Image: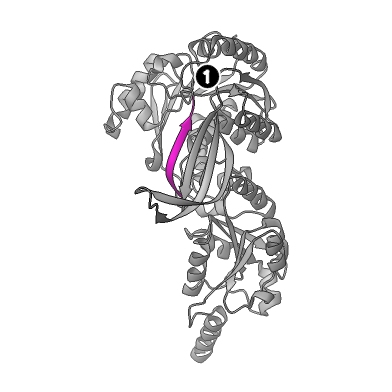
């Protein structure tokens, strides 16, 4: 890992989310009524790129602009709380902090309201920002420019970063572009446009997306900018990397990596930018860097709202857990860290637990019903030793690693964690779920962890079981059949 900080420059955004339920139409007008449930802020744009880098353990300097308003104050507090150096952020007296309000019901965006000034920042703000960048870029390992077309990356800023940098001081410069005029990015080492952006930048339209002509469009961009590599993100179609470092173009296609049902791609591009940048700064081969960025994006798209990559989950996938489901199996400490970020975004967390020795239809019924109660479903499973203490000799029939993989492969399950104790009380205390789910064969008073959840304002839900489905019954039937055959 590099010991020098990364400098991120770009548009800082306060993403504000409002969650609720929609079940009625207004009598005043033919519009839906959202019944407010909760709301939260998240850092977006270049701020989210910085948070992604910080969550991966890197030191970050962030340069940009906020207004002298509450959104700007919140952004600076949030970034500082994560250890990000915010001294290069300009506080403008003339323009507000960019704010995007998203209204969400049942994991679907209903409306987005933007409050922003998209004109280039004023000369006074630009002068201060250039001064900050000159100081901040000293002894950095590389620079990431995150352009959201909100006026921060002016011609003067791009000239300073891309075309006037001292050769002995600068590292790789990666640009995530938004402007259709890619000539502005001349001097960038790596560009990371999405498919729509590169098509529109090379004379196409947003509805004209023949993938077969991407190589020629990438070549046009390379000639225009002199970039050493162009990474085109293509959503469900993965990514295409065009590497020009050898003089001849090398194309690498990276299929999309999915670990969850895709609820929201907001911020996935920021994760790609952050991981591709840091891997390039570490001189990772570009094809491998793109593969890691692709995996990282797949890890965040299952969470509604801008999200940051979890370092433990990424390490797990990169070093042996090759199946997408493997990234959903987390240690207790990694899980609590991931849930802290989810809780900050307002996500409602559901928890259930069991041995899950033989996964059957009854389990699927319970898990699907549990997932419908919130935004994230966490499943705790007893370790092999714990199952043996509870169920006796001969159990479990399936080891804890296999049981965890089976559960993680289900789309209704967001995370799985294995616990060694006889009961899940310590896991529940760490997870702090909003809703604790058990089967209706329990009574409320017998549910372990009930007091922990209710003290925090949460609740216990008992879900009716499907008749005729029992793990113990299935095991006894299997053993009886085996005995008869012998």
Is the residue marked by circle 1 packed among few (<14), some (14-19), or many (20+) residues within 10 Å?
many
* Residue that extends furthest to the bottom in the rendered view of this protein: 484
**Coordinates of residue 401 in the picture (x, y in percent):** 59, 62
In the rendered view, tell whether residue 361 sits above or below residue 85.
below
Figure colour scheme: one colour
- Which quadrant of the structure image shows residue 345? top right
The residue depicted at 60 percent of the width and 28 percent of the height is 282
- Which quadrant of the structure image shows residue 211? top left
**Coordinates of residue 442 in the picture (x, y in percent):** 62, 78
Q: Horizontally, is 6 left or right of 99 in the view?
A: right
In the rendered view, tell whether residue 294 sits above or below residue 283.
below
**SS at badge 1:** loop
Magenta-colored stretch includes residue 216: no
Q: Quadrant of the N terminus?
A: top right
Front in this rendered view, residue 53 or 318: 53
Front in this rendered view, residue 337 or 94: 94
Front in this rendered view, residue 170 or 306: 306
Front in this rendered view, residue 379 or 257: 379
Q: Horizontally, is 366 left or right of 178 in the view?
A: right
**Coordinates of residue 419 in the picture (x, y in percent):** 68, 63
Q: Horizontally, is 448 left or right of 261 in the view?
A: right
**Coordinates of residue 363 in the picture (x, y in percent):** 51, 71
Magenta-colored stretch includes residue 109: yes
Is residue 56 something that shows in the picture? no
* Residue that extends furthest to the front in the rendered view of this protein: 28
Q: Chief secondary structure of the magenta span?
A: strand
The residue depicted at 69 percent of the width and 51 percent of the height is 333
* Disc 1 target residue: 152
- Which quadrant of the structure image shows residue 198? top left
In the rendered view, tell whether residue 182 sits above or below residue 272.
above
Is residue 424 something that shows in the picture? yes
Which residue range is magenta in the image? 107-116
């Amino acid at each position: 890992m590099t010991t020098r900080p990364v400098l991120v420059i770009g548009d800082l955004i306060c993403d504000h989310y409002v969650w609720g339920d929609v079940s009625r139409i207004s009598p005043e007008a033919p519009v839906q009524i959202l019944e407010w449930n909760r709301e939260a802020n998240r850092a977006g744009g270049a701020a989210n790129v910085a948070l992604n880098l910080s969550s991966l353990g890197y030191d970050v300097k962030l340069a940009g602009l906020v207004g002298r308003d509450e959104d700007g104050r919140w952004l600076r507090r949030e970034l500082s709380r994560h250890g990000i150096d915010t001294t290069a952020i300009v506080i403008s007296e003339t323009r507000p902090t960019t704010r995007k309000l998203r209204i969400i019901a049942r994991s679907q965006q209903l409306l987005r309201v933007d409050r922003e000034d998209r004109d280039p920042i004023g000369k006074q703000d630009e002068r201060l920002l250039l001064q900050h960048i000159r100081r901040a870029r000293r002894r950095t390992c590389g620079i990431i420019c995150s352009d959201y077309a909100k006026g921060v990356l002016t011609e003067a800023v791009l000239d300073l970063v891309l075309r006037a940098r001292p050769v002995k001081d600068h590292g790789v410069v990666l640009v995530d572009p938004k402007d259709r005029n890619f000539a502005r990015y001349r001097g960038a080492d790596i560009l990371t446009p999405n498919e729509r952006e590169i098509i529109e930048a090379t004379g196409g339209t947003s509805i004209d997306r023949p993938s077969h002509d991407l190589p020629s469009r990438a070549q046009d961009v390379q000639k225009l900018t002199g970039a050493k590599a162009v990474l085109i993100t293509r959503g469900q179609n993965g990514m295409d990397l065009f590497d020009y470092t050898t003089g001849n173009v090398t194309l690498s296609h990276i299929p999309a990596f999915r670990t969850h049902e895709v609820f929201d791609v907001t911020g996935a591009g920021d994760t790609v930018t952050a991981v591709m940048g840091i891997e390039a700064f570490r001189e990772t081969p570009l094809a491998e860097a793109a593969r890691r960025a692709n995996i990282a994006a797949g890890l965040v798209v299952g969470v509604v709202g801008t999200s940051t990559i979890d370092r433990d989950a990424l390490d797990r996938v990169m070093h042996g857990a090759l199946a997408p489901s493997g990234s959903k199996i987390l240690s207790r400490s990694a899980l609590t860290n991931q849930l802290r970020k989810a809780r900050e975004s307002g996500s409602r967390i559901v928890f259930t637990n069991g041995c899950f020795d033989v996964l059957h239809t009854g389990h699927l019924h319970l898990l699907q019903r549990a997932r419908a109660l919130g935004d994230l479903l966490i499943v705790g499973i007893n370790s092999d030793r714990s199952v043996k203490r509870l169920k006796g000799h001969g159990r479990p029939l399936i080891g804890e690693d296999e049981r965890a993989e089976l559960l993680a492969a289900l789309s209704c399950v967001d995370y799985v964690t294995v616990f060694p104790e006889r009961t899940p009380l310590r896991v529940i205390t760490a997870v702090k779920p909003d809703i604790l789910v058990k089967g209706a064969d329990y009574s409320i008073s017998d549910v372990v962890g009930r007091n922990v959840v209710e003290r925090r304002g949460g609740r216990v839900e008992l879900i009716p079981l499907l008749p005729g489905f029992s793990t113990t019954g299935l095991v006894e039937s299997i053993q009886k059949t085996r005995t008869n055959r012998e």
